[in-house]
Each structure stands twice: as structure tokens, then as C-alpha cells.
Image (cartoon, rainbow, N blue to C red):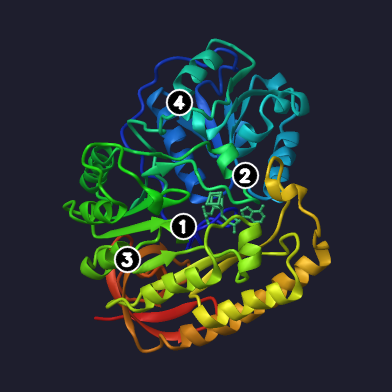
């Protein structure tokens, strides 16, 4: 499942760690102590885009001879890849930095990457003078240069441009999941939702050339990845900058055609750019996963207008009808914000009625969080925190009922599952269906990780499915 802060639900004790290529040691970090020299610790906050950026940053560091360590204490370079989508996420980073206030004296170098870096810029040096590197995601292309400056002993290195047309491509990404690989196809965002920091922190939309995407997909397949997830803040707004001018749906089909790729996912889709050819591609090619994450944010057209979401409730519902009419059932999930300025009780009720109308498979819900630089900051009629909390609880309860009913309908059905987790409990495994439902299941087999099996659902709750492997 998609999302900021929450990240993917991580099943059981997933077996991680497979490095792509062996790092060769190429030199020391100028200012650090000898015992920790050339080691880095990287903590990631936020969404899948951040997770994947961290994989690329780790790949870059490994290729320069650094070694990754599991604790900040053991590292010469401590990096935080940050999220500022909601205030709480941004605060978390400053409290983390506070914990490492004294470390510079120990010869450790501390860097802040990602959205908080972009948003706060050089002010981070004022709030946390022990930080040496501040780099927003739009400047990751310059990271090798910045690392060289750090290695030369420079204490104040910044990368804060957003006007770059580069996408962040690296030779090697150190991927966290041995079976599913993220693949960025578009960076930044050109939509201007009035509550959202992403256009400010990640810069304008930049699509990656289709030939480079397909090259990476082939490399991934050769390395043994069977599932790829195409990533972008508005993944379906993809516009191929090459002469081939591939549409997003054509790209989905082309990635599916890569030998060795068995599943293609994509996230996050924007409703305004969600066109019938995407549904046709899902219908015609079973490797394209039957799951669409289509954030609606609100069920009230009035609130959608205030959010500058570029579609009305009716237009959104038409997109849902298009998917429900597909020859192959498609799992649909969404994001919702409650308590946007000016959201009345009847606006909120429209969101509840949308939940009943669409019957989402699952959703992420958030209380509106006012963010710096965003137009909604200046809007009147702020909703009190207690009222936001009440609405969130009501919404989540409604969705819980819907999920209970929807999941119960799956009992007795069999699904293909990519096994990605093994429980400490004997013979218990977990994995995801093509429609991105996680199933915990029993099997007598002993080596299932990374394999595809058929699982029949035997039990269901609002947030879980359980089953047994079909033999
Ligand atoms: N690009 C995606 C889209 O258009 O839906 C979503 C990107 S955003 C990183 C993920 C989710 O965070 C959004 O869908 C929205 O529900 C939520 N979000 C973004 N800004 C927010 C804010 N200021 N307060 C509360 N939730 C917010
Ligand atoms: Fe933010 Fe809207 Fe862009 Fe999504 S589409 S990243 S919510 S501005």
C-alpha cells in the first residue's frame, strides 16, 4: 500500500539486504574518526518516493566505498531523508537531529536530505548548527559533488535548487526488497493542490526518457526482480520526453513485455489524468496489476475546488465507474483529508457518502495539516483539532465496516501471492496479491520467500486476510 509516513505495510520478518554490486573502498571521509571512517547510517521518513530516493543515495555511497551500518553511533556519516507533508513528520526530524546534537564533536557528519531540507533550506544550519549537509530531492543529481566536498572536510554543503530538469538517475540503487523494485518514471509535481508542499519541495514535474526506464526494467529483470513498481507523485501524468512519445499506458505495456517481469505496479495516480487507455492496458495485460490508488481527498465538490484538485466529485465517480466496468476486477484505494479549512459538516457527510458509493478496498486518511508556503494556509474557517479528530474517527469507523464486508466477500477465493514475509510462527507466511491485498497464510513448504503461490482465503477481518496455500 502506498503512502506518506505510513509507508508500505511490512509483512513479518521480511528478508532484506541484497546489495547490487560490491563497493570498492575509494578513500576516507576527511573529517571523521578512524574507527568509523567510510560508514553511513541512513534513516528514511515518508513515502515510497523517499524510500526509493534513499535506495539511490545508499547505492551512490556504496559505489564510493562507504559501508552501510545499522546504528547512527557506528557511522561516520548520519543521513536523514525527511518528509514534510504533514507537520508531525517534519517535527520528527528535528527531534532526531536533537538526539545527535553532540555528535559532530565525535567526528560524525550529519546530513538532512529530502523535503524538510528543501523547505527549511539553510535555516537548518541555524536550528541545528551541527548539521553539515542540507540537500533537497531535486538536487540529488549533485550529490556526488556534495559528497566530495564533505570528504574534503567542508562543514556547510547545500543543494537546494528546484529549477533543475534533471531526474535523479544513478548507476546503482541499493534496493531494500529482494523481489520488488521501485522504478521512478516521473519526479516533482505540476499540480498545485492548495494544501500540498510537494511542488515546493520536489520541484516541477520531470518525466524520465522511456528508453532509460526500459533499460532499468531490463536490468532489474536480469538481477532477478520479478515485480516492478513505477513511481511518481502523479505517475499517470507521465509524458515521454523522447521522440517515441510513449503514453503512460504504452509504457505500462512495454515494461510488462520485459522478459522476467511478472508484475507491474504503479503509484500514485491523479484522477484528472486517469484515462480509459490505462484501464484497457490493465484489461489486456495480466502482468499489469489490478490495483489503482486514486486519491480523492474529499467527497465534496466545494472542498475539492478549495483544494484545487482539478476535478469534481461527479468527474471522480465517472473514473471509478470506468474501472468498475473493466473486464477484470480492479482493487481501488484512496487518500482522504478531513478538516480542510471551510469543510462543513455537510461537506464531511459527502465524503462519507462517497465511501459508501465507491466501497474502497482500503484508504489512508489524514487530518488536514497547515503547511508553510501553501495557499490553504491563508484560508479562513480553520477546523478545530478536536473536530478534525472526531471526523477522522468517524471516517475510519465507516471504512472499517466497508472493509469488513468487502474482505468477507473474498473468503473462498484463491489468489496468486508473491511471498515476501515469513513469520516467527512455524509454517506461517505472508505476501501480496496482484490487487495489493496482504494475506497471511499457512504452508508446509520451507523455502517460499520470493516465490509465487496460490492462496485460498479462509478468514477475513477489516484489516487482514488469512488463508492456506493451494497445492
Ligand atoms: N500525489 C499524490 C496525490 O495527488 O494524491 C499524493 C501525494 S501526498 C505525498 C500523499 C497524501 O498526503 C495526499 O494524497 C494527501 O491525502 C496527504 N496530504 C498531503 N498534504 C497534506 C496536508 N497538508 N495535510 C494532510 N494531508 C496531506
Ligand atoms: Fe501534492 Fe497535489 Fe501534487 Fe499530489 S497532485 S503531490 S497532492 S500537489
The residue carrying pointer 1 sits among few (fewer than 14), some (14 to 19) or many (20 or more) residues within 10 Å by Cα, namely many
**To which residue does mark 3 refer?**
276
Alpha carbons under labels 1 and 2: distance apart = 16 Å
Helix, strand, or loop for circle 4? loop
- The numbered mark, 1 or 2, whose residue comes first in the sequence reads 2
The residue carrying pointer 3 sits among few (fewer than 14), some (14 to 19) or many (20 or more) residues within 10 Å by Cα, namely few
Q: Is residue 453 left or right of residue 382?
A: left
Q: Is residue 406 above or below residue 425?
A: below
At 41% from the left edge and 76% from the top edge, which residue is drawn?
A: 321
- The numbered mark, 3 or 1, whose residue comes first in the sequence reads 1
Q: Residue 61: where, in percent of width, then height? A: 44, 28
**To which residue does mark 4 refer?**
66
At 24% from the left edge and 49% from the top edge, which residue is drawn?
A: 224
Q: Residue 320: where, in percent of width, then height? A: 43, 73
**To which residue does mark 2 refer?**
197
- The numbered mark, 3 or 4, whose residue comes first in the sequence reads 4
- The numbered mark, 1 or 4, whose residue comes first in the sequence reads 4
- Which tag is nearer the camera, tag 3 or tag 4? 3
Respond yes or no on whether mark 2 lies under 8 Å from ligand 1: yes
Alpha carbons under labels 3 and 4: distance apart = 47 Å
Respond yes or no on whether mark 1 lies under 8 Å from ligand 1: yes
Quarter of the figure with the C terminus: bottom left
At 57% from the left edge and 53% from the top edge, which residue is drawn?
A: 4
**To which residue does mark 1 refer?**
270
Alpha carbons under labels 2 and 4: distance apart = 32 Å
The residue carrying pointer 4 sits among few (fewer than 14), some (14 to 19) or many (20 or more) residues within 10 Å by Cα, namely many
Quadrant of the rendered image holding ligand 1: bottom right
- The numbered mark, 2 or 3, whose residue comes first in the sequence reads 2
Amino acid at each position: 500500500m502506498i503512502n506518506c509516513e505510513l509507508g508500505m505495510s511490512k509483512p513479518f520478518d521480511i528478508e532484506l539486504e541484497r546489495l547490487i554490486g560490491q563497493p570498492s573502498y575509494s578513500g576516507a571521509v576527511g573529517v571523521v574518526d578512524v574507527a568509523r571512517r567510510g560508514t553511513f547510517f541512513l534513516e528514511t521518513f515518508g513515502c515510497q518516493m523517499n524510500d526509493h530516493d534513499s535506495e539511490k543515495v545508499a547505492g551512490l555511497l556504496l559505489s564510493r566505498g562507504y559501508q552501510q551500518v545499522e546504528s547512527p553511533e557506528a557511522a561516520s556519516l548520519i543521513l536523514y531523508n525527511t518528509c514534510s507533508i504533514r507537520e508531525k513528520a517534519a517535527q520528527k526530524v528535528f527531534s532526531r537531529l536533537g538526539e545527535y546534537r553532540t555528535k559532530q564533536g565525535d567526528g560524525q557528519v550529519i546530513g538532512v536530505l529530502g523535503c524538510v531540507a528543501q523547505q527549511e533550506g539553510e535555516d537548518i544550519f541555524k536550528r541545528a548548527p551541527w548539521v553539515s549537509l542540507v540537500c533537497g530531492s531535486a538536487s540529488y543529481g549533485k550529490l556526488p559533488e556534495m559528497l566530495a566536498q564533505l570528504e574534503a572536510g567542508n562543514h556547510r554543503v547545500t543543494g537546494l535548487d528546484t529549477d533543475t530538469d534533471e531526474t535523479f538517475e544513478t548507476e546503482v540503487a541499493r534496493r531494500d526488497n529482494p523481489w520488488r523494485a521501485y522504478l521512478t518514471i516521473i519526479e516533482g509535481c505540476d499540480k498545485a493542490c492548495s494544501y500540498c508542499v510537494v511542488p515546493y519541495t520536489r520541484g516541477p514535474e520531470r518525466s524520465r526518457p522511456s528508453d532509460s526506464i526500459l533499460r532499468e526494467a531490463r536490468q532489474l529483470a536480469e538481477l532477478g526482480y520479478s515485480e516492478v513498481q513505477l513511481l511518481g507523485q502523479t505517475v499517470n501524468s507521465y509524458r515521454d520526453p523522447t521522440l517515441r512519445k510513449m503514453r503512460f499506458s504504452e509504457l505500462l505495456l512495454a515494461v510488462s513485455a520485459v522478459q522476467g517481469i511478472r508484475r507491474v505496479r504503479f503509484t500514485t495516480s491523479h484522477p484528472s489524468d486517469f484515462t480509459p487507455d490505462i484501464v484497457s492496458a490493465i484489461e489486456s495485460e495480466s502482468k499489469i496489476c489490478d490495483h489503482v490508488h486514486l486519491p480523492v481527498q474529499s467527497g465534496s465538490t466545494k472542498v475539492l475546488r478549495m483544494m484545487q484538485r482539478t476535478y469534481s466529485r461527479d468527474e471522480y465517480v465517472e473514473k471509478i465507474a470506468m474501472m468498475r466496468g473493466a473486464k477484470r476486477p480492479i482493487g481501488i484505494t484512496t487518500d482522504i483529508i478531513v478538516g480542510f479549512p471551510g469543510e462543513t459538516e455537510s461537506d464531511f457527510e459527502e465524503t462519507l457518502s462517497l465511501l459508501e458509493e465507491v466501497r474502497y478496498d482500503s484508504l489512508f486518511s489524514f487530518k488536514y495539516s497547515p503547511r508553510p508556503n501553501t495557499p490553504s494556509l491563508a484560508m479562513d474557517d480553520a477546523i478545530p483539532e478536536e473536530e478534525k479528530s472526531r471526523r477522522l474517527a468517524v471516517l475510519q469507523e465507516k471504512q472499517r465496516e466497508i472493509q469488513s464486508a468487502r474482505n468477507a466477500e473474498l473468503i473462498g477465493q484463491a489468489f496468486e501471492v508473491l511471498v515476501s514475509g515469513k513469520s516467527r510462527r512455524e509454517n506461517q507466511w505472508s505476501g501480496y496479491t496482484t490487487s495489493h491485498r496482504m494475506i497471511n497464510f499457512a504452508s508446509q513448504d520451507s523455502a517460499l520467500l520470493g516465490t509465487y503461490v496460490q492462496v485460498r482465503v479462509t478468514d477475513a477481518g477489516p484489516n487482514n486476510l488469512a488463508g492456506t496455500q493451494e497445492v
